[in-house]
Amino acid sequence: MSELEAELRSAVRGEVGFDVTSRALVTMDASNYRRVPVGVVAPRDADDVAAVLEVCRTRGVPVVARGGGTSIAGQATGTGVVLDFTRHMNRLLALDPATRTAVVQPGLVLDRLQEAAAPHGLRFGPDPSTHGRCTLGGMIGNNSCGSHSVAWGTTADSVRELDVITARGQRLRPGRDWAGAPQGLRELVEGELARLRTGFPDLPRRISGYALDALLPEKGADVARSFCGSEGTLGIVTEATVRLVEPPRARALAVLGYADESAAAEAAAGLLDCAPLTVEGMAADLVPSATGLPRGGAWLFVETGGESAAEARARAETVVRAADVLDALVVTDAAGQRALWRIREDAAGTATRMPDGTEAWPGWEDCAVPPARLGAYLRDFRALLIAHGLRGTPYGHFGDGCVHVRIDFDLLSEAGVARFRRFSEELADVVVAHGGSLSGEHGDGQARAELLPKMYGDELVALFGRAKGIWDPDDLLNPGVLVRPAPLDTNLRFAVLPREPVPVAFGYPADGGDFSAAVRRCVGVAKCRTTGPSGASVMCPSFRATGEEEHSTRGRARLLHEMLAGELVTDGWRSTEVRDALDLCLSCKGCRSDCPVGVDMATYKAEFLHQHYAGRRRPAAHYSMGWLPRWLRLVARTRTAAVVNALASVRPLAALAKRLGGIAPERRIPRLAAEPFSRWERRRQRGRLRAWRAQARAGRRPDLPGRMAFLWPDTFTEHLSPQVGRAAVRVLEAAGVGVVQLPTRRWRARRSDDGGPAGYGMSLLNPRRTRACCGLTYLSTGQLDRARAVLRETLDLLEPFLLLEPDEFAYPPPFVVLEPSCAAALRADLPELLADDPRAARLAARVLTFAEALERLAPDWSPPRLERPVTGQTHCHQHAVLGDAPDRRLRGAAALTGDLVGGCCGLAGNFGFEKGHFEVSKACAEDQLLPAVRAAEPGTVVLADGFSCRTQLEQLAGVQGRHLAEVLAEGLEGEGK
């Protein structure tokens, strides 16, 4: 233990982390920059903060304050000690509706304040798109704004008073009329009044530099306001008294369509006279699908308010009439507005990829100009991009003249970094020429501080340095930011990554086969750190359960980044730090769909486990549950299910089996079905064939179904819940879809004279029985060599059917998969693991879920109308990979009312059964699923299409979850169909 670490541990009550993991998690924020700290401290109170400052000042170690770590310019990283306020100093201390104020700690997430204020008809005005994870301390440090700044201003407009500890331990309460000013600050200002009155551009989004003009006497000498936007360089905020506003009772959203973003920008300033709440702009390049948006190539999102819905709509319609638009849409229902706002909020992540998949980066994320000059600025900006051969799609707060944009800088090569510098310098000149600010929201950090002399001139920048010297004479707080800044092209986080792709098992087709590029996808937006109500989203269940950065998607991506860098995490794929961080990843794949940039941590985890355990003994659970298909087939072959169930019911034997198999002792071993589904299906098929033969002998045409489908015998349906398979057969056949059992022997398709398949006539190629398998259990435990072998065997088995082309028959029979996780493995993991085998893509394209099969194969069939409410949870893999729109339509057609919640059940295949995971697994279930089930009215159907979800419900709540096929089959029986 270092002397610094030992001294800090003895001085503070909060956690002190000098280990590799603690440091690796905070090497980056959401910017292009990376700095490795010496340690991290999570203070419990202001006394802890003062103690850290005392120790670090004595030893000359810098201190950096950090909240949610979503800063875009690099100001939340540092080489000294990082103060993490999110762990303990994250409370709402007081809320006074009468004075419309709240007292908050710096680590409080904005949404928690909004939730507390809402019952009083109040809210905090600024609302950045990261409102679900950004903290009030970070917002004060950056003077954050958000989409409603045209109505309620910036964070500085909402701060009444601050509690601040300076680098030398002085405790101050900055406020108006010089309250809380350090000695010498007033004298500095009074000696530079003329410069302060003329040196700052007048625009709503001037965030760059220090707001020393707030100290002018005519502006109330507001020390708190002047402190906002100082990016942790002047003092450490330990409490803040903030102003709340009363939002309108009703809102409407007018979405205005324009030809391009320049046209939208030019129109934005003219709408301010309508007193809107927001005037947000974005272009079509940032929208994955324009469904639901009015016609156009760019849009303004203009929100209006009123005392009633009618008044809000009338104001929105006034905005539409005042706007010269191609098309417009006015939305008044809350759900419709949330869906549209989600498109805008996700732009911060979506913008990190160009339409062709090329990476794009921040750095010039949020320049601001006077709103009336925004259109002209955007034209000049576009011209500069073209001149440098760069691309970017602007979006942002058009009503305030603030533009966000990510640009496809090449930050991996020397030439690319040099171009990044040249472009930055020239764009700064363009911004200043339009009377703008280099930063309009996210602060200067390392990205822009070097260029502040272009905006303010050398003398005013020197004045910033003098102010910094008064607050922090030892340059202890966040050095290299704002004053005496580090060059904008140093400390780039990409510089440490390998230049050549590392050998991996998955294909990573969206990242050019490069695992480093896949890891680079995480830009730190931190949507995975959201802990409030998540709606239909899934990501990130382990973080929601633990609250630890290490167990967020971003935290794991950071550790993988450091593993590839090899500077902090030095043992590569053998890293225990990365292994431990990935241990609580449920492989739910929620990040694949919910992360704005599509990070797929489940795939990265499988890759890591494959590499980590190569040539080494694995955990027992990898053998007991990873090889589950093999063990269950052995039981079926020997017809010993009853024996296994009997042994598992004997507690000492079950306890021994769980200990040997690495299974959580709290878990009950699921019972095996007495008869596997395929055995039942073979009997049924034989009966069908006899009936068809009898019809033929009687001279009647066999009653053959019009359409056929293969029913996939997944391990869970086959051995653990065959009743689901039987129900699915019943429903599919009632819909006119014939169910065909997959072959268990490999066949060769007969060839025609021209070499193509001659039809269904086949000859036996291999008498050995085998089973089609999606490889899910091998994938989730990272046994990728075994998964690859199993999947190739499956492709060999199905090859004759995969060769069938649509023009040979009415259509090639699809493969209906009842278990969502197995369907997701076939549709997503199979083609990525066997990217070199064209059969993999063919099989993936033919996989259908139960609801998809009914919709595609029996579009005219009407399910029984059940007229019952439902509750439960959409399977996480269904949400992330497959989509649930067909399921929702099928439920609607069957008169099954109600919505399913998001999140993950927490069992997640082998995860919840593994030793050491039970508490987290249970916490995940308690996040959304179990509360929804408990709140359901009597008679409500609990839907759970996944075996894991049903098992979790049974073991934690004593509730029987049911597959949708079972519910529909029961309805058919009731109707006598």
Image (cartoon, rainbow, N blue to C red):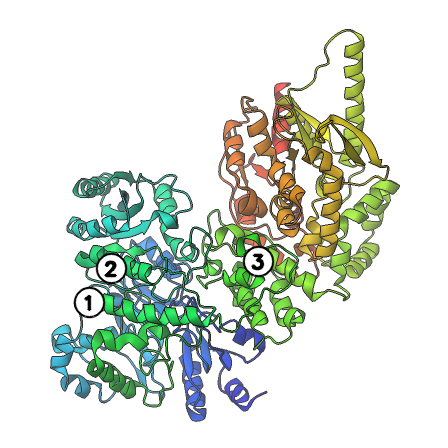
Q: Earlier in the sequence, mark 1 or mark 3?
A: 1
* Amino acid type, label 1: Ala
- Given contact means CB atoms under 8 Å apart, are the residues at marks 1 and 3 in contact? no
Which residue is located at x 49 percent, y 62 percent?
522
Q: How far is the residue under mark 1 from the one under mark 2?
A: 10 Å
Label 3 CA crowd tier, 10 Å (few <14, some 14–19, many 20+): many
**Residue on which the image places disc 1:** 433
Label 2 CA crowd tier, 10 Å (few <14, some 14–19, many 20+): some
Q: How far is the residue under mark 3 from the one under mark 2?
A: 40 Å
* Amino acid type, label 2: Asp
- The answer to whether residue 960 shows anywhere in this view is no
Is residue 637 toward the left or the right of residue 786 in the image?
right
- Given contact means CB atoms under 8 Å apart, are the residues at marks 3 and 2 in contact? no
**Residue on which the image places disc 3:** 601
- Given contact means CB atoms under 8 Å apart, are the residues at marks 1 and 2 in contact? yes
Residue closest to the eye, 928 or 563: 563
- The answer to whether residue 606 shows anywhere in this view is yes
**Residue on which the image places disc 2:** 380
Q: Residue furthest right?
A: 638
Q: Earlier in the sequence, mark 1 or mark 2?
A: 2
